[in-house]
Amino acid sequence: MEMKPRTVGNVAVLAIEGRFDANTAPTVQQWLEQATAMPGARVLVDLSATTFVDSTALATLVSAMKRCQQGQGAFALCGLRRPVLMIFELTRLDKAFNIFVDADHALAVLNS
């Protein structure tokens, strides 16, 4: 797994490439904890290059989303490939997250 963090406007963006699983989740969790620490944080996780997510990865994302919401911020996902999207649909987490087709659309909404 490779993480590519960046900032676009007032949105912290994390692109995750490869497998996002129990082995790689602690690194992502650490970044997300910092990104969601400030009230009003706006965070986008770009999963367009993510090939696999497991239950630990899902729990990491849910935890970050809750922290963001508690601080009156915004948290979104984008670019889910079909196999990854299917996992979100099977767990019904596609209903819990704001999911965008691509980063451009997500950033337009989050930066507004």
Image: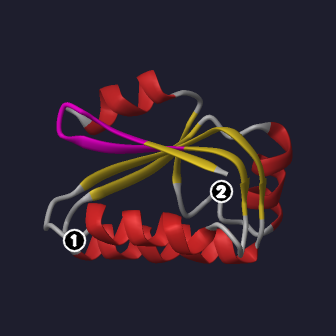
Q: Residue at x 71, y 75 (%)?
A: 22
Q: Could you say which quadrant of the image residue 30 lies in?
A: bottom left
Q: Nearer the viewer's eye, disc 1 or disc 2?
A: 1
- Tell whether 98 sits left or right of 36: right
Q: Residue at x 26, y 76 (%)?
A: 70
Structural distance between the alpha carbons of marks 1 and 2: 24 Å
Q: Residue 91 at what x, y percent from top left?
A: 77, 69
Q: Residue furthest left?
A: 39
Residue topped by disc 2: 94
What's the amino acid at mark 1? Ala
Assign the magenta stretch its main secondary structure. strand
Q: Residue at x 42, y 33 (%)?
A: 106
Q: Does the magenta segment cover residue 67?
A: no
Residue topped by disc 1: 37
Q: Residue 5 at what x, y percent from top left?
A: 39, 43
**48 and 19: which is toward the camera:** 19
Q: Residue 71 at what x, y percent from top left?
A: 20, 72
In what element is the residue under mark 2? loop
